[in-house]
Amino acid sequence: MKKLIVLVMAIAIGLASYFYFSRPHQSIEKIVQQPLVKTSKATITTHYVKRGKYALYTKVYLPAVRAKLPFVIICPGYSASYKDYEIIAKKLSKAGIGAAVFDFVGGNLHSASGGKMSAMSPSSEEKDLTALIRYFMKQGYCDQHHFYLAGHSQGGLIASLVAAKRKDIRSLFLCAPAYNIPDMVKLVAVPKKGKTMRVGNGEVGHQYIQEMKAIKMYKDVKAYTKPVYIFHGTVDLTVPISYSWDAKEAYKNCHVYPYADEWHVFSHEAISKMCKKVIHVINKQKTEK
């Protein structure tokens, strides 16, 4: 039975990520900002944002017009890379919205932010995201009154947990948030310290399983009362859409957009549709006090 549960977890969480690409290991620990790179579509900068002994590899897409911009941090899913979400950042920047994509420390087997995947946990990813929020809130181009979090799969879960502890996130945009992981780990034994468990495209350790077991869905996220927008495929087998419908009941202000015949990883058509909705919501909120 235990082997079956672990197998289900491996399939489910493994599919929860976009495919990542091999890249060199990064170990830079200082905050570094590369010079602006001008393109016809956006201005792209690379940042290394310090978090403890690590440096979070982050790419920022800004529209050509410099002003106080609405800003979105996009959180990757389990074992996913920042590269998998650049298509979204590009679409947002073309619409006049700043966007950042990044790698969690140990977020995948070859994380550009360094760290071991076996040491990654919900709390470590919350620390990563909090460090990024703190950093970008200080940037001159960021409109602190229109600051957003977005996330796919496990990244959506982490964004939800962080937003519930803050007052400065204007809205949440979540793509198939993996609210089912705490349920999935209930019957799995916590690995002994120093031991790991193979799950999907990586290995998780003691801290990951222990912390996921402790999450109380949806109690731990419903403190967030501002608008939540969830986009979910109707044939998603990795995170059943029922978890998003449950979230709609738990949150005070939640909107769920079911995408017919879409799986856990959206098609380009669905991504475009989702981005149009995100852009529409942000533009509307810009006109509100």
Image (cartoon, rainbow, N blue to C red):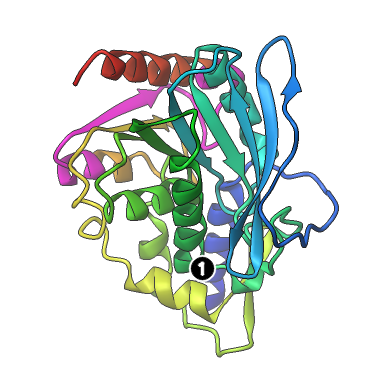
Q: Does 105 sit left or right of 153 as displayed?
A: right
Q: For the residue marked with disc 1, what is the amino acid?
A: Ser
> Residue 219: horizontal and vertical position, in percent?
20, 59
**Vertical placement of 4 versus 220: above or below?**
below
> Residue 1: horizontal and vertical position, in percent?
49, 76
Residue linked to disc 1: 121
Question: In this picture, which residue range is highlighted in magenta?
Answer: 246-271
Asked if residue 1 shows in the view, the reply is no
**Vertical placement of 2 versus 237: above or below?**
below
Q: Residue furthest front?
A: 140
Q: How many numbered circles does the render carry? A: 1
Q: Quadrant of residue 174?
A: top left
Q: Residue, x 33% and y 73% (percent of image)?
A: 214
Asked if residue 136 shows in the view, the reply is yes
Q: Secondary structure at mark 1?
A: loop
> Residue 178: horizontal and vertical position, in percent?
42, 50
Q: Residue, x 65% and y 17% (percent of image)?
A: 42
**Vertical placement of 148 versus 259: above or below?**
below
Q: Nearer the viewer, residue 103 or 234?
A: 103
Question: Dot 1, how many residues are within 10 Å of its Cα: few (below 14), some (14-19), or many (20+)?
Answer: many
Q: Nearer the viewer, residue 242 or 87?
A: 87
Q: Does 29 sit left or right of 289 as displayed?
A: right
Q: Residue, x 14% and y 40% (percent of image)?
A: 252
Q: Quadrant of residue 184?
A: bottom left
Q: Residue, x 19% and y 21% (percent of image)?
A: 289
Q: Quadrant of residue 196?
A: bottom right
Residue 247 is inside the magenta segment:
yes
Q: Nearer the viewer, residue 57 or 19?
A: 57
Residue 261 is inside the magenta segment:
yes
Q: Residue furthest top?
A: 40
Q: Nearer the viewer, residue 78 or 1?
A: 78
> Residue 269: horizontal and vertical position, in percent?
56, 15
